């Protein structure tokens, strides 16, 4: 059996979708969480000087969405054909767009620039949320009409973006200090469904003990 090790920072952000996916797919992995103080001594050893990385049998892979896409394919969460896969990629890229905008605002240290970035982020966020809300509503509660997956006795049409939004919205909610999905009931219900899945619930419970 292959040995998996995912390395990222203690916060969720771009490493969390892969943690969700690995957990849901039943792939055992070593969950390495670095602190900001530890990061400088590891940075030079990273393929592109960034995290996350995924090590499989001591071979290192990088780029967060490439890693998540690989895991999604292994778990049949990447669509039933090339058209569905393209829809998934487009949805994931849109999620990344708004996550990046929110992240740039959050990490900016210059107060003048930070205020401008915050204004831009808060202007853009409702547009993305409304689009995502409509997409989920039009797809009967999921981002994409994917293959039927089974979690104990319930059937779900799950795909990679469902897990990604559950992870990303958690981070965005942290930045906003409120639930980003609170005014978007379809998104809120989807995130609750993802977090209630047995393997995701078990991961979140375990995560709370190691953070």
Image (cartoon, rainbow, N blue to C red):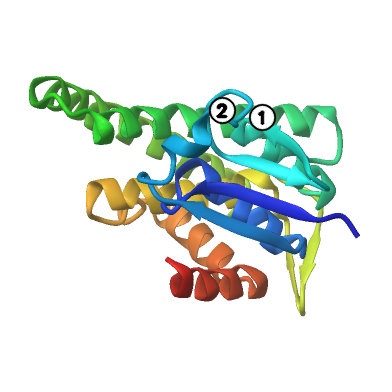
* Viewer can see residue 81: yes
| Front position in the image: 116 or 186 | 116
Residue at 54% over, 74% down: 206
Query: The residue tagged with tag 1: helix, strand or loop?
Result: helix
Q: Quadrant of residue 19?
A: bottom right
- Numbered tag placed on residue 80 in the rendering: none
- In this view, the residue farthest toward the left is 112
* Horizontal side of residue 43 vs 156, given as left or right: left
Return the x and y of residue 168 as percentages of the image width and height.
46, 46
* Horizontal side of residue 116 vs 10, given as left or right: left
Q: Is residue 48 above or below residue 175?
A: above
Residue at 46% over, 52% down: 187
Neighbour class for label 1 at 10 Å: few (<14), some, many (≥20)? some
| Front position in the image: 177 or 79 | 177
| Front position in the image: 100 or 37 | 37
Query: The residue tagged with tag 2: helix, strand or loop?
Result: helix
Q: Which residue is mark 1?
A: 89
Mark 2 and mark 1 in contact? Answer it, CB < 8 Å.
yes
Q: Which residue is mark 2?
A: 93
Return the x and y of residue 88 as percentages of the image width and height.
68, 34
- In this view, the residue farthest toward the front is 41
Return the x and y of residue 131 as percentages of the image width and height.
45, 34
Residue at 64% over, 50% down: 6
| Front position in the image: 170 or 148 | 170
Residue at 76% over, 32% down: 85
Q: Is residue 158 above or below residue 138?
A: below
Q: Quadrant of residue 118?
A: top left
Instruction: Give the Cα distance between marks 2 and 1.
Output: 6 Å
Q: Where, quadrant-wise, is the N terminus in this rendering?
A: bottom right
Q: Quadrant of residue 158?
A: bottom right
């Amino acid at each position: 059996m292959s040995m998996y090790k995912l390395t990222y920072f203690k916060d969720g952000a771009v490493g969390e979708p892969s943690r969700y996916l690995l957990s849901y797919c039943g792939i055992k992995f070593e969950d390495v969480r670095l602190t900001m103080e530890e990061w400088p001594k590891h940075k030079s050893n990273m393929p592109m000087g960034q995290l996350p990385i995924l090590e499989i049998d001591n071979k290192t892979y990088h780029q967060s969405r490439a890693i998540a896409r690989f895991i999604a394919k292994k778990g049949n969460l990447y669509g039933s054909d090339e058209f569905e896969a393209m829809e998934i990629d487009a949805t994931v890229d849109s999620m990344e767009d708004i996550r990046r905008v929110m992240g740039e605002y959050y990490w900016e240290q210059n107060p003048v620039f930070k205020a401008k970035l915050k204004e831009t982020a808060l202007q853009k966020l409702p547009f993305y949320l409304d689009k995502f809300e409509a997409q989920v509503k039009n797809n009967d509660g999921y981002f994409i009409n994917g293959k039927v997956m089974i979690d104990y006795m319930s059937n779900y049409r799950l795909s990679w973006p469902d897990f990604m939004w559950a992870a990303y919205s958690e981070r965005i909610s942290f930045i906003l200090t409120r639930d980003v999905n609170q005014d978007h009931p379809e998104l809120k219900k989807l995130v609750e469904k993802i977090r209630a899945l047995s393997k995701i619930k078990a991961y979140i419970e375990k995560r709370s003990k190691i953070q």
